[in-house]
């Protein structure tokens, strides 16, 4: 009986000591503080989101504005602003070298930034549309000049002017070969046309004429001897 009573008493929880009570109290206080911090963060986020929604709405309604730049803010604030901009149908970008200097810019969809504009902001430069247009034109001219230079290297060499045009005051507008076809002999210099040199007699007539000339020579020779 005594053993049974002893085992029951030993299994019962002992009353907490002063140290245990203090530890539990500190744990409850810490949990309460954490809960309060979470509630404060949640409330601040809600207030910040409401504030950003107001600024975004004002930006959309202002027809004179194409973009808006915000002051540097923390990562959580930037994420909230990006979310608000996406819901509102705006384009948003973050720029800045380090975490402390990063800021958000909003753009209306009809005035979305070009790649050159975004690159300027990433470099920490101000965007000037006129200077950008000048740079674009210079690049186009340079590209055209390079293309023309490449074409001229591939093009075969050719004279700058036509030979006939250059010497037309000396040789005329017709080539020498063409002029040779129309060249006629001048009879005053003793040239005989080829047609006049052509023999139109038959062979028999030519032979008879030769024989007659021989007989005539023989007859003349015998007369002189007498």
Image (spheres, rainbow, N blue to C red):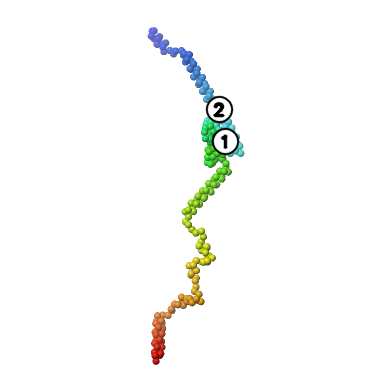
| Residue placed under numbered mark 2 in the picture | 44
Q: Check the image and report above or below for 77 versus 173.
A: above
Task: Please indicate, yes or no, whether residue 64 appears anywhere in the rendered image.
Answer: yes
Number of marks: 2
Which badge, 1 or 2, comes first in the chain's sequence?
A: 2
Estimate how packed mark 2 is, as few (under 14), some (14 to 19) or many (20 or more) residues with alpha carbons within 10 Å. Answer: few
Secondary structure beneath dot 1 equals: strand
Tell me residue 154's x, y (percent): 47, 53
Q: Secondary structure at mark 2?
A: helix
Cα separation, mark 1 vs mark 2, equals 22 Å
Instruction: Locate the C terminus by quadrant.
Output: bottom left
Instruction: Please state which of residues 153 and 74 is positioned toward the viewer in this rendering.
Output: 153
Pick the residue in front: 4 or 27.
27
Tell us which disc is closer to us: 1 or 2: 1
Q: Is residue 138 left or right of residue 222?
A: right
Residues marked 1 and 2 touching at CB (< 8 Å): no
> Split into 4 quadrants, where in the image is the N terminus?
top left
Q: Which mark is residue 211?
A: none
Vertical side of 1 occupied by 222: above or below = below
Q: Is disc 1 surrounded by few (<14), some (14 to 19) or many (20+) residues within 10 Å?
A: few
Q: Residue 180 location, x and y as percent?
A: 48, 69
Q: Residue at x 61, y 37 (%)?
A: 62
- The part of the image, by quadrant, that contains residue 70 is top right
Residue labelled with disc 1: 69
Pick the residue in front: 76 or 186.
Answer: 186
Can you name the residue that lies furthest to the top here? 2
Give x and y (percent) for residue 151: 49, 53
Q: Residue furthest front?
A: 225
Whether residue 206 sits left or right of residue 47 in the image: it is: left
The outermost residue toward the bottom is 226
Task: Tell me which residue sits at (50%, 73%) in the image.
Answer: 184
């Amino acid at each position: 009986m005594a053993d049974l009573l002893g085992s029951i008493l030993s299994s019962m929880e002992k009353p907490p000591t002063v140290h245990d009570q203090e530890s539990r109290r500190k744990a409850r206080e810490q949990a309460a503080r954490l809960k309060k911090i979470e509630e404060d963060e949640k409330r601040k986020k809600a207030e910040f989101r409401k504030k950003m929604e107001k600024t975004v709405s004002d930006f959309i309604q202002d027809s004179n504005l194409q973009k808006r730049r915000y002051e540097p803010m923390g990562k959580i604030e930037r994420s909230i602003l990006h979310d608000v901009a996406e819901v509102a149908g705006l384009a948003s970008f973050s720029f800045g070298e380090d975490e402390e200097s990063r800021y958000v810019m909003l753009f209306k969809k009809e005035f979305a930034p070009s790649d050159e504009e975004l690159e300027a902001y990433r470099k920490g430069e101000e965007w000037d549309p006129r200077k950008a247009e000048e740079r674009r034109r210079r690049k186009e001219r340079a590209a055209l000049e390079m293309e023309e230079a490449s074409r001229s290297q591939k093009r075969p060499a050719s004279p700058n002017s036509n030979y006939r045009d250059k010497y037309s005051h000396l040789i005329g507008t017709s080539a020498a070969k063409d002029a040779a076809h129309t060249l006629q002999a001048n009879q005053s210099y003793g040239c005989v046309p080829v047609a006049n040199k052509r023999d139109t007699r038959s062979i028999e007539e030519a032979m008879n004429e030769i024989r007659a000339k021989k007989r005539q020579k023989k007859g003349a020779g015998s007369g002189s001897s007498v």
